[in-house]
Image (tube, grey):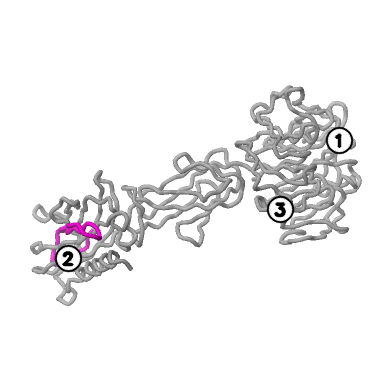
Amino acid sequence: MSARVDRIIAALVAIALAGCGGGSSLPAPSSHAQTQAATTAQFRILIPPKSAQAVLSPKYVSSSTQSVTITLTSVNGAAYTGTVSSPAAVTTSLTPSSSNCTSGASGLTCIAPATAVAGDDIYSVATYDASNDLLSEGTATLTVVAGQANTGNLTLNGVMASVTLAFATDSHVSGSQSAGYAIVGNQPHTFTVVPLDAGGNTIVGAGTPTLTVTASSSAVAIASTATAGTYTAQVQSYSATPVQIVVTPSTGSAVDVPVTTVQEMWVANAGGNNITAYNTSSGAEITADTITVGADSPFMIQTGPNGDLWISNYASGQIEEVVPSTNVAVLSISGSNSAIDDPFGIAFDAGGDLYLSNSGAGGMEKFGASSFAGLTGAQDITPTLNSPGDASDPVQDAVDGSGNLWVADDGDATIHVFNSGLNQIASLTGSQTFLVGPTGVAFDAAGHLWVADNAAPAIDEYTATAITAIGTNIQPVVRIDGGNTGLHQPVGLAFDGAGNLWVANYQTTTSVLEYAAGSLATGGNLTPITTLETGLDEAAGVTFTP
């Protein structure tokens, strides 16, 4: 231990001993003590240099302290209101030029006088900086004995004026506290919170205020860690407006730090035998999140109820559940009991049941959520239901708000509709539908059906009213086609949280296109606002983190 620290500790011990004052052995003062003549009391305050702030805990006195106000609030349990000659509050300057302060190796030691009345006195104490900003506050108790030197000891708590909130270095987090942070994806990210007083000094020791850290929306979940002052933020769902991380101290005012949620997009590359990830805000590929485990001609991809990715591997006849950003397969479904045959489309209903289209068998399978819940590793799971032979070449699936399953069938230019029991209840086909080779289906927030027609090539929209009737020959209300659309062989399509439409071009010019939500009603020769080509190889399925 250094000599300097020894001196500091010795000073603290001396302060504590002086606070005892020996008064506890004397008779208890009268209950009318505050009517007696005022006597003298003082408090010794050590203002440390900033470099020694942590050493001088548990009493928190900021290095920015310039003055202290000590207010006598009660004597023997009765309120003290003060008199002209003995005011309740006494303010004292605490600077190197003050006659009551002396400088030493451990900082500036000052003696601050206070009004006192013989008896059990209780004080409120507040320190301030040069701008009269509150730095710390607390209470002090002192048994005051008339005719005796009454020197007290202070225990103060720092008053938080601001925080330093910083995320650990991570490719998914960008920005700053002042400008706000952006988080890509739905994995937890660590950040630290450090409380600062009005002088910009870190509040340390027992005087540190207790912090409560929350989020202003359920879109982001905040959790504390085993390390004090460290937390995690995990995006639960996309939010159109920034979510505030709210730091509320036990002393001081709450501080808000905005966080923008950015969805991570995942693209299944059948030709590249991988799944590539992208920042939907910047369009940049996140190479660290590329998934290769088990990928064997991955064709479609879907985000499951728990935020994990579910991938259909066409060549291996296998379905995989993968944790985003980990390249780790949690569950693999394959085998004779699973009856998976050249799997393409994957969809989930509101209850977490999984629907799978088998292009090899031309049929559909349903796996109840309970049939694979809690399972890990390679599993051969028998489907809850199956409906073989209802489609010739099913590609992508989607479940509507009523729980019906819609399947794009490239082989017979039809959209098949199944109920939750996998009974086909209707189909969209005929010349009015304009369907030639539908491969992708998705529903927008309004419940309208959008279809990617690989053979046309085009994207068609069918209104919610029209598809509720589930007529056979329904005409689309919007068709996106033409030379400026960038469409070549569209396969999978999906909507992000902001309502923008993303479409994967399978071959010719492999790409992923984004069409702005506000322009979709225009249709026709609609120009995409984003065209991604990096990292793609026969892009087929598209999905997003929640």
Q: Is residue 102 above or below residue 361?
A: below
Q: Nearer the viewer, residue 401 or 442?
A: 442
| Distance between the alpha carbons at the discs numbered 3 and 1 | 31 Å
Q: Does the magenta-highlighted stretch encompass residue 480?
A: no
**In the drawing, does residue 368 fall left or right of residue 29?**
right
Q: Residue furthest bottom?
A: 25
Per the image, the residue denoted by label 1 is 414
N-terminal label among 3 and 2:
2
- Disc on res. 15: none
Per the image, the residue denoted by label 3 is 322
Q: Nearer the viewer, residue 317 or 306?
A: 317
Q: Is residue 206 above or below residue 128?
A: below
Q: Nearer the viewer, mark 1 or mark 2?
A: 2
Q: Nearer the viewer, mark 3 or mark 2?
A: 3
Residue 391 image position (x, y, % from top left): 89, 42
Residue 345 image position (x, y, % from top left): 80, 44
**In the drawing, does residue 188 fall left or right of residue 504?**
left
Per the image, the residue denoted by label 2 is 151
